[in-house]
Image: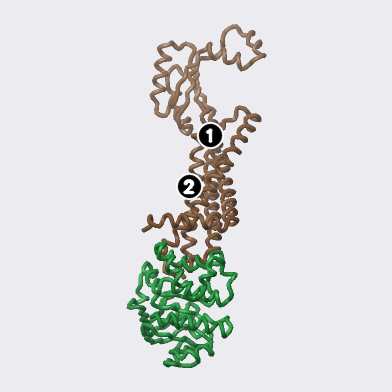
């Protein structure tokens, strides 16, 4: 029954687009605007999430080694540390390498080092952890190993940073939830207006003996099309706007990490299409239901 | 065709719209429903097409107890009932033809059936030459005829009309009445709520008088 009439439902939905072109365009424009706002926020939030991850990943433990350590002891220590849970990477930095880095960091001022005869820098292990929250615990364990002179991980900075990223993420999630909730309300209200404009048709169909699903289908399809088309428009606009914005930001702050991979942007596109289409479908379904009880 | 037993209808604002209504309307009857505004005429009609359910009592339409009718079956009850509204309820962005075909599509008629039926009823009410125009270009009488055409398009057993001659001049009113008599003769049971004393006296049909929710008079070949 449903599929027999699908052609009719689609024709009715498209006819209604044509009969009230202005209304449909206004509807699509309004939904597009809302979806763009949601999309901009989503883009900001994935970029700040990347930014936070980037900062967090720069948290590392530096283990300074005693000068008299042998190569075998280094290897032993390395594998011991690597076997601790939550270690991502252990990198050995020799005395010579540390010296070269310092030279590079000093740049034109490297002449100051010429005053020192012997390389004063200790060899070290640079350790990256999987979960920044574990950093203190892991650092304490490493400090107990032999031949370790000192363990450093910028404890206060790490704690402050982790606190900040935690609060920032939570706040972002809350704002996102509110924004999605508001957009659902606004879109379904816009749809409600288009249904309200046609309440006479609903009443007449209902009194002629049309089943409620027969009445609902054209509206559901229309709501879906309005939501879907709006989401496509907003994705296209967002995409070009984003490419432009990324370009400008990179010109101003070249080293800022930004999400540029299309595969990483895809979930946002999917979220916008789902939001537009689903709210279009459900909004029209509930609005028609309201006028059905004649 | 229609039976009511001790029917009461109270609205949420505690107004008693109908009180202890008992009536039997036979198949093919023509019944005028008269009485002052607020007497319960519209409520009476709404009960028949199950726009509302009775607070108390039984309403049987074509053998179906409407109070017990599941909401999924309401559409099938309504396919046997045509309704002509006082305020027309036409779709002004569709043509005369589409206004009639709309209701037929809604009940799943085939394109062939639709074409046949729409032509037939437009002929009957005399609007076949105006099929392509929009209703706002029709006169009041023609709009009322279009409503009647739409209501009878699927050949219902019952036709309910709520003051169909309310806003028309006597000549046009009588034309509408003749049309309704014609439909009645073909077997459709008609219930017509009306204030039109002239028409009612002339028609000499059954008159049911409502006052403050009660039937106070029910006469065959009655007058206003």
Query: Which element is circle 1 on?
Result: helix
Rendering colour (chain A): brown
Q: Nearer the viewer, residue B130 or A84?
A: B130
C-alpha gap between disc 2 and disc 1: 24 Å
Q: Position of residue A193 (x, y in %)?
A: 56, 60
Which chain is displayed in green in the rendered image? B
- The residue where tag 2 is placed is A274
Q: Give whichever of B138, A125 is nearer the camera.
A: B138
Residue drawn at 40 percent across, 80 percent down? B186
In the displayed structure, A108 sits above or below A184; it is above
Residue A171 visible from this viewpoint: no
Count of numbered badges drawn on the protein: 2
Chain letter behind tag 1:
A
Picture residue at 45% right of the left edge, 21% below the top: A90
Residue placed under numbered mark 1 in the picture: A50
What residue is rendered at 44% in x and 65% in y? B115
**Could you say whether the residue bearing mark 2 is in a helix, strand or loop?**
helix
Depth check: give the residue in front, B81 or B149: B149
Q: Are marks 2 and 1 on the same chain?
A: yes
Dot 1: within a 10 Å radius of its alpha carbon, few (fewer than 14), some, or many (20 or more) residues?
Answer: some
């Amino acid at each position: 029954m449903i599929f027999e009439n699908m052609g009719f439902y689609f024709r009715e939905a498209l006819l209604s687009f044509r009969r009230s072109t202005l209304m449909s365009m206004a509807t699509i424009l309004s939904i597009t605007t809302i979806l763009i706002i949601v999309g901009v926020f989503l883009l900001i939030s994935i970029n700040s999430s990347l930014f936070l991850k980037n900062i967090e990943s720069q948290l590392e433990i530096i283990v300074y080694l005693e000068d008299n350590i042998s190569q075998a002891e280094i290897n032993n220590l390395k594998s011991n540390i690597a076997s601790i849970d939550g270690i991502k990477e252990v990198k050995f930095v020799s005395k010579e390498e540390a010296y070269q880095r310092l030279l590079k960091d000093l740049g034109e001022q490297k002449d100051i080092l010429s005053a020192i005869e012997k390389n004063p820098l200790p060899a070290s292990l640079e350790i990256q952890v999987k979960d920044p929250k574990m950093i203190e615990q892991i650092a304490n364990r490493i400090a107990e190993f032999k031949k370790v002179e000192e363990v450093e991980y910028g404890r206060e900075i790490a704690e402050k940073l982790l606190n900040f990223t935690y609060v920032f993420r939570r706040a972002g999630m809350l704002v996102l939830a509110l924004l999605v909730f508001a957009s659902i309300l606004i879109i379904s209200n816009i749809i409600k207006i288009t249904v309200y404009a046609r309440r006479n048709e609903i009443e007449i169909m209902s009194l002629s003996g049309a089943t409620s699903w027969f009445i609902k289908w054209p509206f559901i399809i229309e709501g879906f099309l309005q939501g879907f088309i709006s989401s496509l428009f907003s994705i296209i606009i967002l995409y070009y706007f984003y490419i432009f914005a990324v370009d400008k930001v990179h010109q101003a702050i070249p080293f800022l990490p930004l999400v540029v991979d299309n595969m990483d942007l895809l979930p946002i596109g999917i979220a916008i299409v789902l939001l537009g289409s689903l709210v279009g479908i459900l909004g029209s379904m509930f609005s028609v239901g309201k006028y059905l009880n004649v | 065709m229609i039976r009511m037993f001790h029917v009461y209808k109270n609205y949420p604002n505690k107004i008693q719209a109908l009180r202890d209504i008992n009536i039997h309307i036979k198949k093919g009857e023509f019944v005028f429903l008269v009485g002052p505004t607020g007497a319960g005429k519209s409520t009476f009609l709404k009960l028949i097409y199950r726009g509302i359910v009775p607070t108390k009592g039984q309403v049987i339409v074509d053998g179906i107890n409407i109070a017990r009718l599941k909401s999924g079956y309401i559409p099938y009850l309504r396919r046997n009932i045509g309704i002509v509204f006082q305020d027309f309820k036409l779709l002004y962005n569709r043509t005369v033809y589409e206004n009639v075909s709309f209701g037929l599509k809604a009940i799943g008629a085939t394109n062939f059936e639709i074409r046949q039926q729409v032509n037939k009823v437009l002929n009957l009410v005399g609007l076949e030459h105006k099929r392509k125009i929009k209703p706002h270009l029709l006169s009041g009488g023609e709009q009322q005829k279009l409503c009647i055409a739409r209501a009878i398009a699927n050949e219902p057993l019952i036709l309910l009309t709520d003051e169909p001659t309310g806003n028309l001049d006597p000549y046009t009113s009588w034309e509408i009445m003749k049309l309704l008599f014609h439909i009645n003769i073909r077997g459709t049971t008609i219930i017509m709520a009306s204030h039109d004393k002239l028409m009612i006296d002339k028609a000499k049909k059954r008159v049911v008088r409502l006052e403050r929710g009660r039937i106070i008079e029910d006469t065959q070949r009655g007058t206003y």
